[in-house]
Each structure stands twice: as structure tokens, then as C-alpha cells.
Image (cartoon, grey):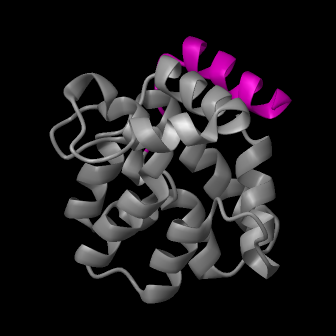
Amino acid sequence: MRHRLRQGLSALVVSDAATLPAPLGEMPRTTRLFSALAPHDRRHLVAVHRACIANGLSLEMTMAGLLHDVGKASLSGRRVTVLDRSVRVVLARWRPELLVRLCRVPTPAWRLGLVLANEHATLGAGRLAALGWPDSIVTAVREHQSDSPKGGLATLRRIDDTTP
């Protein structure tokens, strides 16, 4: 929970995002997904990507690290806010049944950020699959928040959880 607090505080003070990583430079549709994210999310993804490389993860895991949160922005431009993240974390911890109810479809506009925060792994994986990304990367993005990750996915999860 402490790392989520640190991430939330970081989100409040980050004013610009990191430079677009080279692997995305020649993929305009994926670049649009990445660019639709809030600046702190883009910075976080670049930091996770760098940490994955530094930890010697496979190319698939490093790309999953770079793209694991692309589901946190809607295709219409709505982004996950700090409030959405906070509500999701609190509900997931103390009222998971309420979180499930609030994230049901159809979703009113006022709950879209909460749904994006809660379902971003599945949404991001679906978008990457639609763009033709390899199954190994799509699966890693979909599973990056699983309860018992194994191998490179466990390392990606640890890096994600400890990178503001």
C-alpha cells in the first residue's frame, strides 16, 4: 500500500513525461495509445521499461513493461485520475464487492476513470492484440497484476509496484 501512496504523490507533482522510447517511434498506432496517457503514466512506463532492461528481462517483458498501462486511457481521451486510482485501491482493499459493482457495464461517464483503473490490464491487452502485438506481450500486459505471477512476469510486477 505504501508504494501506491508514493505513486499517487508522484502523479500529483509530475509535470512532464519522459521522452517516447525508441521502440515505439516506428509504430504510430501504438504511439497514439502511449501518448493518450497522462504524463505521469508515460513517465512511469518509461521508468519501468528501463528497469526491466537493467534487470535483464527478455525483450517481451521489457516491451510489456513499456506498455503495461496503455489501458489507463480511453479511446475517447478520458484518463485515469489520481482520485480514480485512490478510490480503486481503497475499494479493492476494503470493499472489493463494491468495486466489482461500480465497474459493471454499462458505465456512466462519471465512473469511467474507475473502470479504466480497475480494468486497464484487460483493456490494454485487447488494444495491443488488435494492433497485432505478439501474444507473449499481450499476455504479459493482461497478467501483469495477477495474484501469483511467475518468472519474468513476477519481476515485472515487482518493478511496476516499486517504480513511482
Magenta portion: prevailing SS class: helix
Indicate yes or no whether the magenta region holds residue 5: yes
Looking at the picture, how far across and down is residue 140, in whole percent? 57, 74
Q: From which residue to which does the magenta span run?
A: 1-19
Q: Nearer the viewer, residue 34 or 113?
A: 113
Give the percent coordinates (x, y) of residue 141.
Answer: 52, 67
Q: Could one spot residue 43 in this view of the protein?
A: no
Is 12 covered by the magenta stretch?
Answer: yes
**Is residue 150 depicted above or below 68 in this figure?**
below
Could you tell me which quadrant the N terminus lies in?
Answer: top right
- In the image, what residue occupies the spot 27% across and 22% down? 110
Residue furthest to the left: 76
Q: What residue is rendered at 57% in x and 48% in y?
A: 46
Q: Measured from the top left, where is residue 104 in percent x and y?
A: 34, 46
- State how many labels appear: 0
Q: State left or right for residue 78 relative to residue 62.
A: left
The answer to which quarter of the image holds residue 50 is bottom right
Left or right: residue 85 compared with residue 35: right
x 21%, y 62%: residue: 29
Can you say whether 138 is above or below 53 in the image?
A: below
46 left or right, relative to 73? right
The C terminus - image quarter = top right
Q: Could you say which quadrant of the image residue 152 lies in?
A: bottom right
Vertical arrangement, residue 130 with respect to residue 159, above or below? below
Asked whether the viewer can see residue 112, the reply is yes
Residue furthest toward the top?
A: 13
The percent coordinates of residue 80 (x first, y second) are 41, 31
Seen at 63% across and 74% down, the residue is 61
